[in-house]
Each structure stands twice: as structure tokens, then as C-alpha cells.
Image (cartoon, coloured by chain):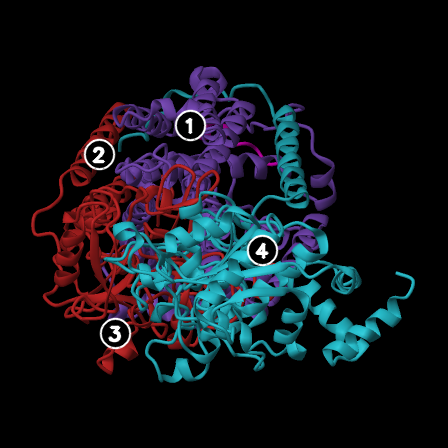
Amino acid sequence: MKARPLGGPILTPTTIALTAMCVLTAIILLVRFVFGLGAVTNLSNGYPWGIWLAYDVAAGTAVACGGFALALVTYALNHGQYSPIMRPAVLASMFGYAMGGFSVLVDISRWWNFWHILWPTYFNFNSVMIEVALCISAYTTILMLEFAPAMVEKAVEWTGRRSANLHGITLKVEKVLNRVLIVIVAVGMTLPTMHQSSLGTLLIPFGATMSPLWNTPVLPFLFLMTALCIGYAMVIFESTLVSDRFSRPSHAEILGQLAKFMMGTIAAFLVVRVVDVAVRGKVPLIFTSGMLGLFFIIETLLFVGALYVLWNRKRRMTPRHQFIAAVFIVVGGVLYRMDSYIVSYHRPGWSYFPSVPEMFISFGIIAVEILGYVLLIKFLPVLHEVNSANGPFWVRADSGKQSAWSRISGH
Amino acid sequence: MTNGLAEQDLVGQRLGLSRRAFMQLCTGVAATLGLGLSEGKVIAQAILSKRRPPVIWLHFAECTGCTESMLRSEHPALDRLLLELISLDYHETLFAGAGHQAEEARDASMAENKGKYVLVVEGAIPTAENGIYCKVGGKTALEIVRKCSEGAAAVIALGSCAAWGGMPSTGPNPTGCTGVAEILGKTVVNIPGCPPNPYNFLSTVIHYLTYGRLPELDAQGRPKFAYGRLIHENCERRPHFDAGRFAQQFGDDGHRQGWCLYKLGCKGPETYANCPSILFCDAGSGSWPVGTGHPCIGCTEKGIGFAKPIHALADLKFVGPIANSSRIVEPQGNGITVLTAAVAAGVAGVLVGAAAIKATQLSNEPHPEQEHSQKEEKP
Amino acid sequence: MSISRRAFLRATALTGAAASVVTAKAASAREPGAKTIPPNAPGMLFDSTLCVGCKACMTACREANGTHPEVTTKDALWDAPLDLSANTLTVIKAWSDGAAEHKDEETDGYAFVKKSCLHCVEPACVSVCPVSAMTKDANTGVVHYDPKACIGCRYCVAACPFGVPRFDYDKSIARLNKCQLCESRRAEGKITACAEVCPTGATLFGTVEELAAEADRRHRMKPGERAFFPRRTVNSGDTHEKQAPHYQARTYGVSEVGGTQVRLLSAVSYDKLGYPTLPDKPFVETAEEIQHSLYKGMIAPAVLFGILLILVKRAHDHRPPDARDLEGKDKR
């Protein structure tokens, strides 16, 4: 059993719709670069950071932590049964981080100086942001290297049929890659630990401007935990959707085992979060700060809800409950990060809500990620076939039946 | 009213004024009083038809500047008009006569016109040691003013000295100089200034003549049409104050360009007067202290004029911060609108709906777990 | 070697607890050796009781820095900025209560306050800027912005406890702006433009030491007694006489978030004037402590990497014969 390209037509309603979204986004981006941030966003000096940083970077990179979270259990804890879902997770992470970096470029106002963030003479190591920027840049490269085997595999196969010379080269590349892959994987777990926690430390200078319900010295830990549980949730989410969409056998067995690790990180997050708020004496704020308290409660309920959904062992192994829990965690975790960056931030008199073009750029960036993922799983050997002793297990309730789509696509 | 035009011509011939100039004059007085321009006709009628009231004009601790100011009013022969409007029965400066005869003429006029004459007082009244520091004809100013005011129909204190003591009352005030109102204890019309603009006085008199009553007075007995606003409110250099352009020293660039004199001690912000509006000496724009480049010294205000140092900063008598001040917290930024809320809610709704639908489509059957699902087989 | 689920959870919890302790400890005590103000560092003193809201300082600041008027009223006739901006480096704001009739009183009163960069001793903007575009001069302590280094991330805008740095969102080629104590004027030996023109001496320029002494002198005054107040600088000799007001007991900026070089005096409480009560320890100091203790010498990341490398190699070496290679290939 190995990974195979999914194949199938490139032009589908989905890809066409996503491409249209990307084109629209490109147009809005053009306006942003020609006329400035004010022409496209609702950013202001009271709210200098908006959804591009809060979602596309802070929350989006957590959504892209599937590769990191999975690598931890697969390699560090030696649970090799997860390797079939490793490549799709790395693919999703690669796009997520690449678009996160792109979002930064789009957001910073003096973008022609962006290279300063990589040039040592400018570095200010007191700033959390320099570490985050360097770490994310390095990690994006690592992710590409982690995904490289899929591309090299395809190249080996393609050149094998066409050119002996090129085939020889690609085989050598593959060999080198295999040797350094151990280091790359280890680095690929170190880096996200650093920068995902630092995304939390980044907020600590906001001090009194940020609500005490979110601002705490344990932000690094909370952000690391949310990175992991959102990562697991995204692996479950994407795997379930792909199995459903392309009528493939489900990985629900290993996803159910993965869900246990997710529950561990959820529990760690919840306990530290609630205890921290209590220890700092800010529990009354939950009920006296209006909308802020409501957001806190919603976040917490979503995390608790996911735990509840997964508590029962049998339910944990069903695609439906796995999916619901994953959605709860992604929504709750993204909400937690966006609340930390925007909702809990307040300067008297100022207000912020993203403008329509601003939202559309975020949607467009997500569209690029999905489009890239869908296209690459069709071209490159990413998706594995399922190895299950009990025969294929289907995600659909009407198990065994082929969807109309897979009949058309010929799978 | 019937032979109005003919009467006007008579006055014109008597006063040496054309009918047109006379009407312009009356309209001008109406404007100074802050009345509608149509009141000019009423004033003209009053001037033409009324009997000239007698005026007793007293001088005490003063410099005669108020009288001099009066004499320099230029609107067509106003001094002559004044003399024609009223019957000036006693005036130390303008009288040819002097001595006991003049005093007797005054007493006679007061007796004859008891209850009908207007008493104008120029100068402060020294009160120390029973008022011996100012005596006219052997009588103290204190005695004279009390006696003369008994039968007066109205008392007008002309100039800061008569209004509240003025320059002679500057600390330590050894002579005990006081204003008329404080001595008499009855309603006195105060026309402060050093000197006051003559038209403030003239307009008050003509108002009384026309309507039979004094114009509206403020808490200090000053006619509101002249003393109702701060100089700061009408000053032509106010835009410079608002923009923060101050002359720092006499003769510097800002001073030469006519910038605000607040920093040099201008008391305009705490002084009530109409100097910037009607100016002095009919010499055209800029003919008032600030206009010439010297800060206002607050000569109309007790406690400011001749009390506060000329170059000390004025306290600003504001009602509150000016209307376009930036407040501590200003609503700023771009918040939620119906459109953005709708788009966000719409997208969120679609996503939640899709997830819900997908969840119902997914199988609720647990994947059968295998024994070795927890760990990899050991080699 | 593999780790049981229980062990994993335990390890996670322990790490979390350890991290929490480290960060909580960093957040509590103020570290000794906190930064100090360089000797003869320039500063300013703003006395709200002297300010009459004339806005001469705003006009002078515009002239000194080449900024242009901002119209915000309907008639568009006045330069009336609502707040600091990329184009307005200092602004006079008016506070009022009730009928707003008595200057410098909290009931039915009004007061004026000046907003501008406070040139903190431990500036948040300097600490958070990733590319050192915000720097604090070692000799003068003035916080300087270098647009050539700036990438426009606006971290400084978000992190300043006083909301001072402002970005220009209306231009495509944009920059940040804030008061820099009139660098070009100081280079010519002049004082800041705002202190130069202030007619009442509400804004004074001088060294932080002499201004602190002047602030103390004012605190010692008896409310109501006639006192002399200097204009432009403390020792200019250009004074005017006024009744001493009833000041708030503390000078704002002595200890707030580590102290500032531009300080304030007021009769009305500072938080009403938009200057909030802040702790002595700068918020950025907590972040720096966490960051430096976690990443000092990159030891912790190296250790983590080492452990992970060992684990990954072991997993790779001990995978079952029929298992796939790291990325799914059959073992050769």
C-alpha cells in the first residue's frame, strides 16, 4: 500500500468556484497595494491589527498545525499507524503556513522593507515578533522539505518513464532526502513549539489594553496547547472530508486514537485557562464585562463540548462524532485566538469590524489553501490507501454506496 | 408727525446738518444701542420733538479724560448735537463761568428741575477722612454727590473712576476713592472705561430720551449693549489666539504681523467692553489699544484695570471648552455596519449549516477497533 | 521506545505547569537593575492647570514638523484633529464635567490635557519592534523612529500603553509618526517648539532632573497662594504670577510603566484626562523575561531538538519490517 495521486478532472465546480474567489482576491489585493490599507480595510490606530493578522496568521497557522501535531505522535511517540495520514496533513500545513506568511506580507504597511525581518543587522531580540517571524519562515521551508518526498516520488516515477538521466538524478535526490528527513522532521517539531507559543507571548506587551480574561503570563502555554488541539482537529476534519468527498475508505480507526491525544491537549488547555483566570481573581469579569464575557463562555463551551462528544469510547470511533468534535475545536480554538488578538483589545472610543473587502481577502487566502490542496492531492502521491483488516470502512451513513461524484470521476 | 420733514429741515438748519446726515446719525445711534435700524426713525422723532432735559455734570477725582473723549467724537458735530439735545446746566470743563456763580447756577437748576434732571458724574469720590481729599467750593465731593443725586431722575457714572474707583483707587488707595454707585446705594448707570467710548454714553442718553427709560443693565449697572460681551469675543485678533499665534515680545515677527497679544498680558479674555466693535476716535480700523499692538489693560473692569499688572496673563472667562475641542475619548475607527454584519453572519451561517449537514451525513457507526491499534508491533 | 498515553499526558501537564511557573514568576517581581534615565536627558513637563487650551503648541508643532491641518468639523474651516495621528504629533484635549464652568475642578469643571510621546524610560515600542525601527538614544533617552528600517507591522502602535505611535492608513507608501522632541531644533540648540510658544508655561522643556525639581516645587505650593510660574524653560526668567492650584498628589510619569521623560501635573485626576493608572513594571518587561528565559542561548530549543531527534531516529530505526518509510515508502 502506498500513496497515489487521486487523479480526476481539474476543472470541477469546486475548483472553478475557488479559482474565481482567488481572482477576486487578487483584484482586491491590487487595490490594497495601490491605494493603501485604509482603502480596503477597517484598520485604524485604535485597532492596528485586524483579521488578517488575527485570523490568517495567528489562527490560520494553528489551523496549519496538523503536520506538527501529527508528527509528535507519529515520530516522537512512535505511533507509526498514523503515517498514512501524514502526507495530507503536511500538505495542508504547508499551504496554511505559506498563506500565513503571505498574509503577513499583505498586511504590513511598508512591505518593501519586509526583508529586514530576515536580515541580521536589523534584528531586535527583545521583540517576540522577530522570533516568530524567523521561526515561521524557517518552518515554512521545513514543511516544503517535509512534503518534498511526495514531489520527488512523482518525479522519480515520471522521469522513470521518460529519461534515464533525469531518473538517475531524481533517485539521488530521493536518497539524500531520506537521509536528512530525520533531522528535518525533528526540526519540524521544534520550530512550531517555539513560534506557536510565542504567538501567545506576542500579546503580553498589550498589558492593560487587553482584557485580563485573555491577557496572562501563561499565554505561551495556552497558545501551544491550542496549536496542538487545533492541529489534531484539522487532521480529523480534513481526513473525514476527503474520505467523504472522494468516496474513499475512512481512517476513522486511527482518527479515533488521535482523538485521545486531542482530548489530552484540550484538557490541559481548559484546566490551565480556567485555573489561571481564577488565580488572578478575574472570574467575576466573565459575568460583568458584557460581550467579552459572552465570548469567553462560548470559547470554553466549545472546548468542553468537544471533550463531551469524544468522551464515550464508541462515539469516539464514529466519523460523525469525530467530525463534530473537530469542528468544535477548530471553531473554539480559532475563536480563542481571534479573541486574544482583537476582541479582548480595546482603546477607549475606538471600534473595529472588518470591512467586506478585508473579509474577502481572508476568504480568498483560505480559497488558495483549499484549491492548492485539492489540486495537489490529484497530481501528487499524497493520499494513502487504507490498511484495515476488517475491510474498507466508509464515512458515509449510507456506507458502501458510491457517491455520484465518484461515479463521474471514475474512482 | 405731520410736519416731520419740515421739522427735520429746521433741525438741520439749526444743527448745520442735512436731513440725510441727520437720519444717518440717528440710525447709527440705533445700531450702537443694538436696536433695529428702523429704530433710527423713532430716535429722530424723539430728538426733534422732546424737550431738552437738563444735565448736571460733576467732576471729582478724575483726569477729565472722559470729557475730552466726549469732545473728540466726530460724527457730525456731535458735541454740538449733544449741547442741542440737552440743556447742559453745569459742566466745569466747558463752562466759561467759574466760582460761586457757577455753583449757584447749578443749585438753581437742580431746584427748578427737581426730579427731571440727569446727573452725570465723572471721577471717583474720595471717602477717606470724611472725603477731604476732593473739595469743590468748600464742599467735599461726598457731600456734593449726595446732594445732587437726591433730585436726579437718573445718575450716570461716566468712566471707570466714577463706576468703581478707577485709577485713583489703585492700591493702596490712600484717599479711599470709590465709585458712585457704592456711595449712593441706588441704581446708577455705569459707563466704565478709561476713557469710555463716547458713543456708549451718547447712546445711553439718547435711549433714555427716546424711550423714557434706561437701556438694559447688567449686574454691575453697565448697559448690556456695550458691556455684554468680552473683548475676547469680538477681537479681530481672535483667530490668532485660536490658532495659537502669539506675539512673544514687542516688535518681534509675530507682533509685526498683528498676532494675538495674550502672552503679552492682554486682558481681553476677562474684560467686558465693546472696544473692538466700535473703536475710538473715528480714525478707522485698528484704532483701539489691541489694534495698535498694545495688550488691553482691562480698564473697564474692577480688579483688573489698574490692579492686575499690565503684562500678567489674563484668566480666561470661558463658559466651557470651545465647541471643536477634541474630547478625551472620541469615537473613532470603523465599527460594525449592517453590511459587514450581514456578510459575516451570512458566511458563518453557511459554514455552520454545511458542517451540520455534513455531520448528519456521516456515519454514526464506530470503526471496529483492533487489538493492536494502540501501539505498533514490537520487532 | 514508546511512551504510553498516560506518560504523554503527564509530561504535557508537567511541562505546562513548569512553563506557567516560569512565566508567572517573570510576571510578578520587578527585576533589579531596571533601566534609568541618562543624566541631563531632555524632557518636558506639562501642567494642566496652566493650560488654557489655546493650542499654540499644536500650531508650533505643525510648523516644526511640517504637518498639515486636519479638518474634522462640518464646516471644514478649522484645524481640529480629534486625536494624535500620523499627521498630528501633539494634541490638546478638553475634559469637562456637567456645566463645565470651573477650570481644573472635578465637579462641573473642565481641564485641558496635552497628548504626545512620553519618551518612556523602558519604551514598549522599542522593545517590540522586530527590526529596530524604534530606538532609544543612549545619551538623550529620546525615542526615535527610523522609517527606513520600519516594515509597518504596527506592533508599536498596538503595544504602546499610551497609544502614541500612529500609522497613516490613507496612503499606499505610508509611515508612522510620533513626537521626537523636535530633533532638528535640539540639534540647533533650541528647545521644543511647543515649549517655545506656550504662553502660560504649561509646557516646559528642560532636563528631567530640573523639571522634576520644578514639579516638586509646585507640589509644595499652598493652594491659593500667589506663585510664580516660568515659561519656556525652568530658568528662563520669563515668569508670570498666578494663584497656586490644588494639584493631584503625584506627578504622572515618575513611575508609570518604568517612568517617562515627559511628565504631567494636574488638578483633575489623571485617568479622567486619558492617562490611565498603570503598574510600575512595564508590560514589555514581562514578555522579555519570558522570551529570554525560554530562549536564552537557544539552550532550551536545542535540548528539545536533541530529544526529538533521538525519538524520531528511534522510531525510524525500530519501525516494523512491513511498515512504511518515514513518508510512506516501503522499506527497502
Q: Position of residue C112 (x, y in %)?
A: 38, 52
Report if the CB atoms under discs 4 and 3 are less than 8 Å apart.
Answer: no
Res C20 label: 2
SS at mark 1 in the image: helix
Q: Which residue is mark 1?
A: A259
Residue A254 on the magenta segment = yes
What kind of residue is marked 1? Answer: Ala
Q: Position of residue B43 (x, y in %)?
A: 75, 61
Labels 3 and 2 touching (C-beta < 8 A)? no
- Element at badge 4? strand
> Within 10 Å of the Cα at label 3, are there few (<14), some (14-19), or many (20+) other Cα atoms?
many
**The residue marked by circle 4 belongs to what chain?**
B
Q: Specify the segment rendered in magenta.
A: A247-255
Which residue matches tag 4?
A: B118
Mark 3 — residue?
C191
Question: Callout 2: 10 Å neighbours few (<14), some, many (20+)?
Answer: many
**Circle nearer the viewer, 1 or 3:** 3
Number of numbered discs visible in the structure rendering: 4
> In which chain is the residue bearing label 1?
A
